[in-house]
Amino acid sequence: MPPSTRLAILVGLLVAAGALRGIAQEPADGEAITERLAAPYSIDLLPDDPATAEEGAAAGGTDPFGRKTVTGDLFDRWLSTKEAGVTFGGRVTQFGFGVAGGIDQPVPPPLGGGDVFVYTGRGEYDAVVDLEKFGGLPRGRLLIRAEHWYGEYGNVSLRAGAFTPVVFPACLPPRPNDPGVPYITNILVTQPLSPDWVVYGGKKDILGSFDQDVFAGGDGTEQFVNQALIANPSFLLGMPYSFFTTGIVAPRDWGGMSVYVMDPKNRTADFLQFGDLFNQGIIIGGEVKYRTKLLDAPGQRHLGAVWKHQPQRDLRFAFQPSDVGGGPLANAGRTLWDSWVVYGGFDQYLVRYGEKPDRGWGLFGRASIADGNPNPIRSFFSTGLGGYSPLGRMRGDTFGLGCFFVGGSSQFGPVPTALFAPRDGVGVEWFYNVQATPWLNVTPDIQWIRPGLGAIATDNAFIYGLRANATF
């Protein structure tokens, strides 16, 4: 992309932000303008006020465990950090998973053989700065997030032979040769300008950015762990994990809209290097979400699209099945510059408990269609049930049961077809999230998949394991 084009894009975004700044106003009494108004579009920050123990209990219940974090009020009361304008938080997640079946042929690293049980850990550490207390506009926020992994990279994801990593959060951050090294994946400023407009910009990770449902989304630490039931793989494959972005979110009573621009270079290992912005192209996307009512129960629908203008592999000449890092290799065979994805989804509560709007369970679904080359996934569909469990709702247990179909591209060339025999993949996942304490949940998880790499994997693979997530 010529320097003049990159400059025009940046100037245009700054002008738009400046124009919106002029309409910034304080919210009405009792109305908090936070990222929660924008969620789950493109904002991923901690809430203004961390939930109390009572709020963590199920509707009508009491919380016998007390505080919602391991550290309690260590930072806020002992160090007065919240009054100073800084809130700390984070979580550590442990994955112990096995695969029966999966890859059964000799393969080069980082792929590996199936029929194993392995351990992976992941840490995520947040600092949220209240920019208003440092001279910024009202409700301005700065998120700084560090992430690292340890144990076996990817857990059994690189041993299953699937297009979608079966323990996706164990692949993050996507630095397979750097166990234990923390990377700054988010340096993101969020600025509400009015109840109807929120702008943001900076460095951000991809999780939770697009195509999110109430019952199937997030980052794999509380709901499903298979990528196909966390985020739509049609656009997630080939995307950078941590990138520079800017965008506008417009929350409305009926739902909301978002538009964003992304630099396609993967910045996971970078800090703040702006000299090569948009050298590798540009990614533009948007989404519309609207609320619905069915039998007096809430739900929401969304429709979005992503267009990528960047060098990507032409599937007829090159193929790399485990590219979880999202960095296209321009020199790996011939390349194509443009790709697109159109997607939609919904969630709908079927049962609700008490008065709290999120207490209950319901149905979700996603679908998408893509170009099929350079995108290795042509079509995608998932559906299932999820939400608060009727068996442990007083404690706050949640559950999920989902199935998915990943339609592989038909444009793979003779070499990748002979080596991997790409085919459509299907799978089913079930989890039950036991809220052992307000700050600890323990989750058994079972999956069955039909791997998409037919030449090197079994026809059936079973994934089983346990996840433990502690919040502090």
Image (cartoon, rainbow, N blue to C red):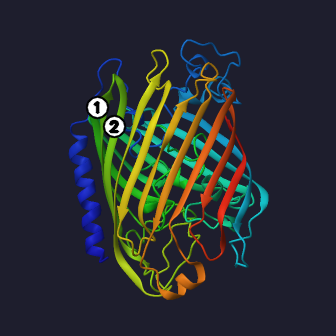
Q: Which mark is residue 192?
A: 2
Residue 408: % across, % down: 46, 69
Q: Quadrant of residue 39?
A: top left
Q: Quadrant of residue 102?
A: bottom right
Quadrant in which the C terminus appears: top right
Q: Is residue 83 above or below residue 154?
A: above
* 453 displayed left or right of 356: right
Q: Which residue is mark 1?
A: 195
Q: Does any portion of residue 250 appear in the rendered image?
A: no
Q: Residue at x 73, y 79 (%)?
A: 106
Quote the CA–CA distance across marks 2 and 1. 7 Å
Residue 84: % across, % down: 54, 30
The one of 445 and 263 positioned closer to us in this rendering: 445
Q: Quadrant of residue 166?
A: bottom right
Quadrant in which the N terminus appears: bottom left
- SS type, badge 1: loop
Q: Residue furthest front?
A: 459
Q: Does any portion of residue 363 appear in the rendered image?
A: yes
Q: Please state which amino acid type lies under the numbered disc 1.
A: Pro
